[in-house]
Amino acid sequence: MKENSWIEKLQEKSLRGESFSRDEFLSMLAVAPDSEEAARLGRAAREVAAAVTGNKARIWAAIGVDYMPCPVNCEFCSFGEKWGIVKEPYAWQDEEVIAMARHFLQRGAKWITLRTTEYFPPERLVDMARKIRQDLPGDYGIVVNTGELAPETAAMFKENGINVVYHSLRLREGDQSGITPEYRLKTLASVRDSPLALAFLVEPVGVEHTDDELADVFFTAMEYNAALTGAMARVPVPGTPLGDRYPVLPEPRLAQLVAAIRLAAGWKAPDICVHPPVKQALAWGANVCVVEAGAVPRDTGHYRQEWQVFTVETASEWFEECGYELDWGLKR
């Protein structure tokens, strides 16, 4: 048998739109991230990305709306009320959100994400979305990343210019987060059964997570019809319970996970995101990355400019270097 022919077979299976088995997904995670085998996996994933996306890259711009202590107290999040990190709470005004959305869209963003803490009023998100649509006409998506929601809230979002809900069943949900898996799954069902699209990353990934845990979350995303998936590494924040407990996930491992997700998601979830941005993951099949401003749960404080100086321009350059064509939300 030709060496690594199993990768070629998985690539062909992905391009045919066939579902992967759990064992096939685990086989991709089992190879050493810095091996030639992993590199071949990455190249195969990049070829699949070109086919299923038309070689289009898309920039997801996230605006953290409220920098507030959150009673949910997820152990990986800087907003947890128990950790005492948020010293000066602040909620962005509509005008500030609109100005930042304009900044992102004029530079090449395809989605504007309004990210909030768990109990932010959904009616305020609807007002923001309406104002953004009114002030900034264009072919872009508005995403909300907020708390648990019922079917009627999902319907309200869709009626008011929101296209996508970001939601996930997080790794070790209910153990290292303040929300039970059952509540997360109810919200995922509300989104799945609505006209909204679902974005659902495998997250927050750390060195301690097993391949089986990663597979569980990925296949949950597929079960709930995620249109966008991918992987998000946990960023250790000093002062949070997990901040000093584990080292940072190595970038080659994050890229390998992204490649596996790209192949296994195939045509079902054409957009694959990596966060924080890792150029190797773009070269290995991710066609979406995130630029952030405002309140960032992976850091302390809220930011008037792009978090960690990763701008839309930088993202565009990275995608170009990896051979993608950028899909803009506003006409150039």
Image (spheres, rainbow, N blue to C red):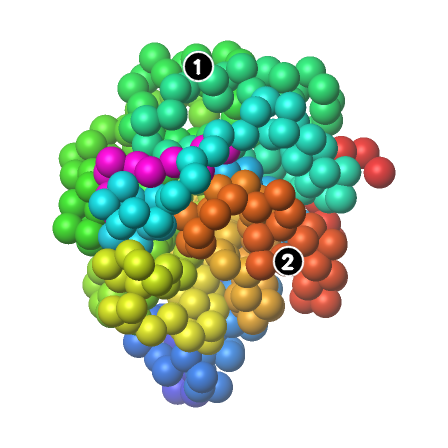
Q: Residue at x 63, y 57 (%)?
A: 310
Of the residues shown, which amino acid type is indicated by label 2? Val
Q: Residue at x 59, y 67 (%)?
A: 279
- Estimate the spatial distance between the alpha carbons at disc 1 and disc 2, rounded to whole Å: 31 Å
Q: Residues within 10 Å of mark 2 (few under 14, many from 20)?
A: few
Q: Nearer the viewer, mark 1 or mark 2?
A: 2
> What residue is shown with label 1?
123
Q: Residue at x 76, y 33 (%)?
A: 330
Q: Which mark is residue 170?
A: none
Q: Residue at x 21, y 63 (%)?
A: 212
Prevalent SS, magenta region: loop
- Give the residue furthest to the right: 332
Magenta segment boundaries in residue numbering:
65-74
- The image position of residue 222, as x and y in percent, is 34, 44
Question: Does 67 lie within the magenta span?
Answer: yes
Q: Nearer the viewer, residue 75 or 279?
A: 75
Residue 9 visible in this rendered orientation of the protein: no
Secondary structure under the numbered disc 2 in the rendered image: helix
Secondary structure under the numbered disc 1 in the rendered image: helix
Compared across the picture, whether 172 is left or right of 18 comes to: left
Residue 3 visible in this rendered orientation of the protein: yes
Q: Nearer the viewer, residue 103 or 216?
A: 103
> What residue is shown with label 2?
309
Q: Residues within 10 Å of mark 1 (few under 14, many from 20)?
A: few
Q: Is residue 58 above or below residue 251?
A: above
* Of pointers 1 and 2, the one earlier in the residue sequence: 1
Find residue 261 and report its image quarter: bottom left
Q: Is residue 288 above or below residue 250?
A: above
Of the residues shown, which amino acid type is indicated by label 1? Glu
- The image position of residue 285, as x and y in percent, is 55, 62
Image quarter hosting the N terminus: bottom left
- The image position of residue 168, as x and y in percent, is 33, 42
